[in-house]
Image: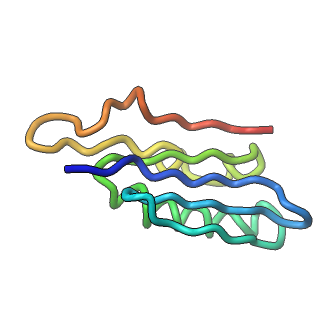
Amino acid sequence: MSGAPSTVIVYKSGGGYRVNVAGRFGGGFSTTRAGSAADVAPFVAAQMQRYAESNPHGGSLIAPPEIAELIPETLRLVTPKAAAGRMVRPESELTTEVVA
């Protein structure tokens, strides 16, 4: 099975946040969300559920502290699922990073 872990990257941009989502096969999107961290965090959590939890390779979140702390810990780093009794991607290849 080919593919890669999903990644959701969030960074400040102007008066809001820029969200870049990369899916398993390189697909995804970029969008700008206005508002506070509390306004943006539910959207980011939904993208982690949509892209990382459904990906057998898992996924990771890279976000400023004010966003990361509002995302449930189980969604910040989604580990790969077992495939035929083996890991499809070593957990060590996935990272979660909080950027200042």
The answer to which of 66 and 83 lies nearer the viewer is 83
So how many labels did they put on this image?
0
Residue 79: x and y in percent read: 37, 41
Q: Is residue 29 left or right of residue 52?
A: right
**Colour scheme in the image?**
rainbow
Q: Is residue 68 left or right of residue 35?
A: left
Residue appearing at x 76%, y 53% in the figure: 11
Residue appearing at x 74%, y 62% in the figure: 18
Task: Answer above or below: position of 81 versus 53.
Answer: above
Residue appearing at x 57%, y 69% in the figure: 29
Residue 38: x and y in percent read: 75, 64
Residue situated furthest right in the rendering: 15
The answer to which of 42 and 64 lies nearer the viewer is 64
Q: Which quarter of the figure is the C terminus placed in?
A: top right
Residue situated furthest left in the rendering: 84
Residue 42: x and y in percent read: 63, 67
Q: Quadrant of residue 12?
A: bottom right
Residue appearing at x 91%, y 66% in the figure: 15
Q: Quadrant of residue 13?
A: bottom right
Task: Answer above or below: position of 87 versus 56.
Answer: above
Residue 19: x and y in percent read: 67, 62
The answer to which of 96 and 41 lies nearer the viewer is 96
The answer to which of 13 and 82 lies nearer the viewer is 13
